[in-house]
Each structure stands twice: as C-alpha cells, then as structure tokens.
Image (spheres, rainbow, N blue to C red):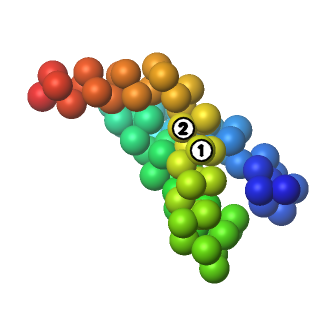
C-alpha cells in the first residue's frame, strides 16, 4: 500500500511533523508548503524510488491531503501575497 511505510500511515505522519514544526515556530502560512515537500520527499525516497514521476505525484497527493489541500494552499497564497 503506497499510503503506508513499515505499517505506518504516511498522511497522519506528515500532519504530525508539520504540527510539530508549527509548535517549534514555523509560521502557519508555510505549513502547506512543508507538508507538500515532506510528501514529495517521502514519495521519492520510499514510495517510488525508481520512478521519480510516480514518486512526485503520489508524494504531492499525500502532502496536499495532509495539509487539507484547499485551506493550506489558500493560507500559503495569502501569506506569500502579504510579504
């Protein structure tokens, strides 16, 4: 299953890491970006290491799912515009 690594669900793991980063000072407006980056890295390294296109697509899907796709992208866009 591409949504698990070593029997650990990936999306909740990404959510947890992003929430930890926010508690450590990551501005909310960058949470969706971190989530997407983590998803892509996991996709490339663990899910499809021999198929970069598949790794990016699945990883981005997982990262955006973890960020709450719409609200995360909206917050990031508003944060970038506000700078």
Q: Dot 2: few (<14), some (14–19), or many (≥20) neighbours within 10 Å? A: many
Give the x, y percent position of residue 38. Answer: 52, 52
Give the x, y percent position of residue 58. Answer: 62, 53
Circle 2 SS class = helix
Q: CA distance from mark 2 to mark 1?
A: 5 Å
- Can residue 42 be seen in this snapshot? no
Residue at 68% over, 42% down: 11
Which label is found at residue 23? none
| Front residue of 36 and 25 | 36
Q: Which quadrant does the C terminus fall into?
A: top left
Residue at 42% over, 34% down: 31
Q: Dot 1: few (<14), some (14–19), or many (≥20) neighbours within 10 Å? A: some
In which quadrant of the rendered view does residue 75 lie? top left
Are the residues flagged by discs 2 and 1 in contact, CB closer than 8 Å?
yes
- Can residue 3 be seen in this snapshot? yes
> In the figure, is residue 23 to the left or right of 30?
right
Residue at 17% over, 25% down: 81
- Considering every residue shown, the one lying at the far bottom of the view is 50
Q: Which residue is mark 1?
A: 61
Which label is found at residue 64? 2
């Amino acid at each position: 299953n591409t949504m698990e690594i070593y029997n650990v669900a990936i999306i909740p793991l990404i959510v947890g890491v992003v929430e930890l980063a926010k508690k450590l000072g990551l501005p909310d407006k960058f949470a969706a970006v971190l989530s997407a980056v983590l998803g892509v890295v996991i996709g490339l390294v663990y899910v499809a290491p021999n198929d970069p296109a598949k790794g990016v697509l699945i990883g981005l899907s997982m990262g955006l799912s973890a960020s709450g796709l719409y609200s995360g992208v909206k917050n990031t866009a508003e944060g970038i515009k506000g700078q």
